């Protein structure tokens, strides 16, 4: 097993990435020496924002420099264990390419020409433009796109200004179908972290969820605990993911047909009487109305759709049913696949219900019932004159808004024009499908403001760039964690902001002051507000600052008991197998199969996913993380590659059904994927030249996602509907 | 006296590379060098595949060729802890140990002109803490502890499951053990 040094590097996923960090980073060697000589390290507890799981972090600070990040052992989302990205937070903090000062555009949008400005000038510019738009078109013509902790600062600013047009890609480009489906069926979200009781499960079923590569600390911990416990792992994925590598049953399904498999499993459960009759009777409605709806979905029928063997469908269905309710049937997280996504999620929830897993050990545990006293509302927001357009015409769009609806209105001017975008913490060009539409919408704007840490592709289109400091340099809202137990966690700065950057709360408040809306931010420093919140909750602020997290003991009630029934927040108070709400809006009240188009000869369905050391496009320039995974490759089935005469490492371009041609990308020849699809890790192929490490590395899957299937129920965008051909590079 | 060892439970390794990132920050490992790595191998043909993922590091061998081949005695086996360590002030950067190590566990720190490698985070262990990689290991695959303490997790795991070492035939007697499958009937 002799490994050459070259392999050592390759195994770690590293390529010869340019490493500019050594020269700009603080000299840790000197700091450690100082520590050994007696300089004391300070430990600052806070919570992570390398992704949105919000793990508790203990930042070790020596002499004003963060030298190490470790997990907070008492924080329920990490239990002391940070993932690679969490460890790599230092790489964000000390990334030399960070935004360092407010910038005002001097060239054309997207050409990257800016001049530095003072905060005073930049904020005055933004406030002035906002007021001009409000005077001309009304305040509703300003929209906010946001993701992450910036939301709690910019949302009130927008509402105070008079617009409700807020949208977060976490809905329409990610979890939205799941949110809508749970809302319709149980009235209670499954939460983030998803409340799956995997450490107690006898069976774990993943449908396209690539846990491990999709890294969320406590969830992956629970998954490996389930493996260790000897739970039967069933993974449905066209790709032999890391999770599939751990599975007892890997079902390499034909992409776009997962619904058929779920319907067949429901068919088996109903037909064989494997459902939990007592549970169904007590806690659900509509059973009689759905029981015959799955008759046609036999394993043989599903086999033809899914390219799985009927006996495998039967056998896995039997395993799932036999072990109920201790079955963790994961509803997935990024579930915007093909436009029929709400219904697919509904089907999963119906199966969860028939097996009686909601509120049962090893299934889905119940959220902590503990309540915090409500925070005083503050000054009431003005009522906008025009109806918000951020949910489009989608009857079951969620409160996070539909980004693509706002984009569509920006393009069409209907029902009224959107003339200003305020973008906080989201790289829309790498997030929304069909980036060309996003670019066109941007052309229609009178104002584009970006608040961010890094000069992403979207940021370098902005008229004004407001540089936010990193999560390690700022306060944000106290995180209310509602898992098994209720817990509160604080974000507080480990070090002072570097360069001329500011926390989002400061930016929002200063803008509010400029707009005469200072009353909505009735404090000087955000820490005052956090302290007041703690007073209301009767929580010791000093203790929270010191420990980073406070868990409320005795606040868990995870399983159904005689005194702890499930409290479904639906009209009937029960879990609604049959959806009258959907029926009223002319949608199928019971999930039905809709066949998706399949690629033709020479085409491959483009599927995409994640690397455990990256969060979308947010981390692709991080010096610590690029050393572990510098760029994506296109995964191609080994047999197909041989036919095409392609070897691993060969450069190819992908061209999609609309003739969009990708930049060159290297091929990864592998047995780990079906012959009818190719796979890319999402988030690469940055075009912003200010990202020195990420620029031009790998390819953007988003650029090839020119088609998207909008789910008419919730407005979410199915993005796994694009087909590509492979073009060899000479 | 403790006999420190690491057990790596491959069943729980998810290949997330958190260990690498934590190790590099903890030990100021220079760009391009690594003290630990994640190795992923896949066997078989679609759809009959088998995957093995594990992390690898210095094996802190009980019969360490690197130590025997060090002309300046910079590389040594610590008598108290059994860790294979390096007295950097004695290291002349001749790379004899690098060549001798069958696990490719060592690298040259060019800036300092010395060889370097995993120390089992001896500086943390001395303070009663565990290693950086074990602390952060999301899958709970890496476990560190004292083989002489029957209550330690490493001892318990080795009692429960069959374990192997890497390149056992080389006679290096590694102190890093790999669990590939459960000892318990499933
Ligand atoms: S899962 Fe990783 S990146 Fe996400 S919050 Fe936790 S440590 Fe940070």
Image (spheres, rainbow, N blue to C red):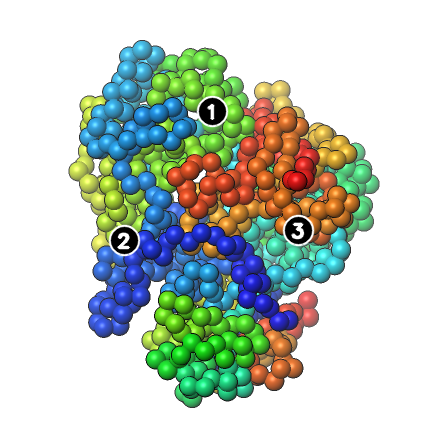
Closer to the camera, B177 or A300?
B177
Marks counted in the figure total 3
In this view, the residue farthest toward the top is A136
Point out the tag, 2 or 1, that comes first from the N-terminus.
1
Q: Name the residue tied to disc 1.
A: A439
Return the chain for callout 3: A
Q: Name the residue tied to disc 2.
A: A494
Q: Name the residue tied to disc 3.
A: A648
**Picture quadrant where residue A606 is located:** top right
Rendered location of residue B49, percent (x, y): 72, 57
**On the picture, is B119 further left or further right than A726?**
left
Foreground label between 3 and 1: 3
Looking at the rendered structure, whether the residues under marks 2 and 1 are on a common chain is answered as: yes
Rendered location of residue A228, percent (x, y): 59, 64
Distance from Cα at disc 3 to Cα at disc 1:
34 Å
SS for tag 1? helix
The dot on residue A336 is: none
Structural crowding at the residue carrying mark 2, measured as other residues with C-alpha within 10 Å and reported as few (<14), some (14–19) or many (≥20)? many
Rendered location of residue A74, percent (x, y): 37, 59
Foreground label between 2 and 1: 1
Return the chain for callout 1: A
Structural crowding at the residue carrying mark 3, measured as other residues with C-alpha within 10 Å and reported as few (<14), some (14–19) or many (≥20)? some
SS for tag 3? loop
**On the picture, is A695 further left or further right than A656?**
left
At horizontal 51% and vertical 28% (from top left) the residue drawn is A435
Return the chain for callout 2: A
At horizontal 42% and vertical 76% (from top left) the residue drawn is B93
SS for tag 2? loop
**Picture quadrant where residue A701 is located:** top right
């Amino acid at each position: 097993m002799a490994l050459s040094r070259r392999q050592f590097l390759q195994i770690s996923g590293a390529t010869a990435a340019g490493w500019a960090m050594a020269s700009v980073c603080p000299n840790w060697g000197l700091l450690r020496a100082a520590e050994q000589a007696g300089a004391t390290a300070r430990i600052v507890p806070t919570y992570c924002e390398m992704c949105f799981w919000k793990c508790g972090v203990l930042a070790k600070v020596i002499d004003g420099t963060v030298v190490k990040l470790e997990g907070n052992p008492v924080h329920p989302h990490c239990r002391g264990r940070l993932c690679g990205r969490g460890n790599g937070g230092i790489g964000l903090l000390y990334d030399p390419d960070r935004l360092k000062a407010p910038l005002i555009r001097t060239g054309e949008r997207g050409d990257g020409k800016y001049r530095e400005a003072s905060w005073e000038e930049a904020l005055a510019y933004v406030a002035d433009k906002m007021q001009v738009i409000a005077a001309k078109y009304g305040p509703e013509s300003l929209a906010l796109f946001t993701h992450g902790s910036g939301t709690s600062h910019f949302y009130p600013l927008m509402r105070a200004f008079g617009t409700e047009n807020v949208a977060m890609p976490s809905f329409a480009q990610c979890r939205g179908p799941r949110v809508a489906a749970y809302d319709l069926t149980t009235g209670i979200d499954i939460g983030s972290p998803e409340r799956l009781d995997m450490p107690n499960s006898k069976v774990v079923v993943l449908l396209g969820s690539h846990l491990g590569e999709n890294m969320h600390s406590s969830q992956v911990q629970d998954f490996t605990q389930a493996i260790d416990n000897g739970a039967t792992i069933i993974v449905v994925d066209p790709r032999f993911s890391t999770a599939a590598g751990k599975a007892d049953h890997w079902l390499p399904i034909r992409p776009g047909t997962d619904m058929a498999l779920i319907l067949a499993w429901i068919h088996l459960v109903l037909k064989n009487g494997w459902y939990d009759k007592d549970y169904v009777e007590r806690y659900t409605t509509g059973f009689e109305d759905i029981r015959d709806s799955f008759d046609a979905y036999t394993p043989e029928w599903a086999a033809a759709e899914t390219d799985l063997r009927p006996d495998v469908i039967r056998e896995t269905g039997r395993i799932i049913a036999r072990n109920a309710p201790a079955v963790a049937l994961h509803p997935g997280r990024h579930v915007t696949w093909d436009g029929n996504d709400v219904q697919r999620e509904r089907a999963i929830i119906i199966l969860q219900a028939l097996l009686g897993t909601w509120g049962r050990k090893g299934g889905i545990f119940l959220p902590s019932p503990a309540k915090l006293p409500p925070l005083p509302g503050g000054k009431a927001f003005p009522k906008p004159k025009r109806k918000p357009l951020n949910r489009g015409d989608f009857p079951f769009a969620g409160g996070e808004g539909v980004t693509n609806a706002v984009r569509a209105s920006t393009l069409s001017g209907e029902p009224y024009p959107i003339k200003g975008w305020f973008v906080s913490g989201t790289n829309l060009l790498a997030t929304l499908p069909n980036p060309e539409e996003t670019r066109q919408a941007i052309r229609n704007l009178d104002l584009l403001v970006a608040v961010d840490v890094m000069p992403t592709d979207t940021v370098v289109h902005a008229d004004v760039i407001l540089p936010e400091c990193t999560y390690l340099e700022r306060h944000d809202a106290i995180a209310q964690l509602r898992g098994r137990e209720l817990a509160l966690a604080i974000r507080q700065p480990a070090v002072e902001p570097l360069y001329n950057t500011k926390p989002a709360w400061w930016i929002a408040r200063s803008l509010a002051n400029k707009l005469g809306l200072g009353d909505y931010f009735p404090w000087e420093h955000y820490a005052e507000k956090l302290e007041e919140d703690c007073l209301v909750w009767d929580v010791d602020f000093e203790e929270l600052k010191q420990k980073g997290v406070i868990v409320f003991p005795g606040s868990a009630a995870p399983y159904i008991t005689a005194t702890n029934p499930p409290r479904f927040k639906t009209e009937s108070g029960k879990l609604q197998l049959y959806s009258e709400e959907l029926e009223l809006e002319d949608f199928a009240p019971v999930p039905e199969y809709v066949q998706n188009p399949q690629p033709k000869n020479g085409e491959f369905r483009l599927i995409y996913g994640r690397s455990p050391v990256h969060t979308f496009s947010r981390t692709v320039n991080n010096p610590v993380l690029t050393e572990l995974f510098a760029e994506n490759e296109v995964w191609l089935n080994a047999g197909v590659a041989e036919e095409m005469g392609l070897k691993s490492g060969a450069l190819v371009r992908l061209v999609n059904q609309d003739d969009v041609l990708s930049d060159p990308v290297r091929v990864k020849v592998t047995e780990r994927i079906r012959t009818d699809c190719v796979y890319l890790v999402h988030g690469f192929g940055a075009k912003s030249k200010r990202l020195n490490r990420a620029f031009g590395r790998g390819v953007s899957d988003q650029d090839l996602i020119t088609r998207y299937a909008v789910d008419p129920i919730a407005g979410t965008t199915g993005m796994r509907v694009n087909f590509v051909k492979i073009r060899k590079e000479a | 006296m403790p006999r420190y060892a690491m057990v790596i439970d491959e069943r729980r390794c998810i290949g997330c590379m958190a260990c690498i990132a934590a190790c590099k920050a903890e030990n100021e490992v220079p760009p391009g060098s690594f003290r630990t790595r994640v190795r992923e191998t896949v066997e078989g043909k679609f759809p009959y595949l088998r995957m093995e993922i594990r992390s690898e590091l210095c094996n802190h061998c009980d019969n360490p060729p690197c130590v025997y081949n060090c002309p300046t005695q910079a590389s040594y086996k610590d008598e108290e802890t059994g860790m294979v360590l390096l007295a950097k002030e004695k290291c002349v950067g001749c790379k004899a140990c690098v060549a001798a190590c069958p696990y490719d566990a060592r690298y040259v720190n060019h800036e300092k002109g010395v060889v370097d490698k995993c120390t089992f985070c001896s500086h943390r262990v001395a303070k009663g803490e565990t290693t950086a990689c074990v602390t952060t290991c999301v899958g709970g695959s890496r476990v560190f502890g004292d083989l002489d303490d029957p209550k330690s997790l490493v001892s318990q795991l080795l009692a429960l499951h069959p374990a192997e070492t890497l390149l056992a035939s080389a006679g290096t007697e590694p102190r890093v053990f790999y669990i590939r499958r459960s000892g318990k009937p499933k």
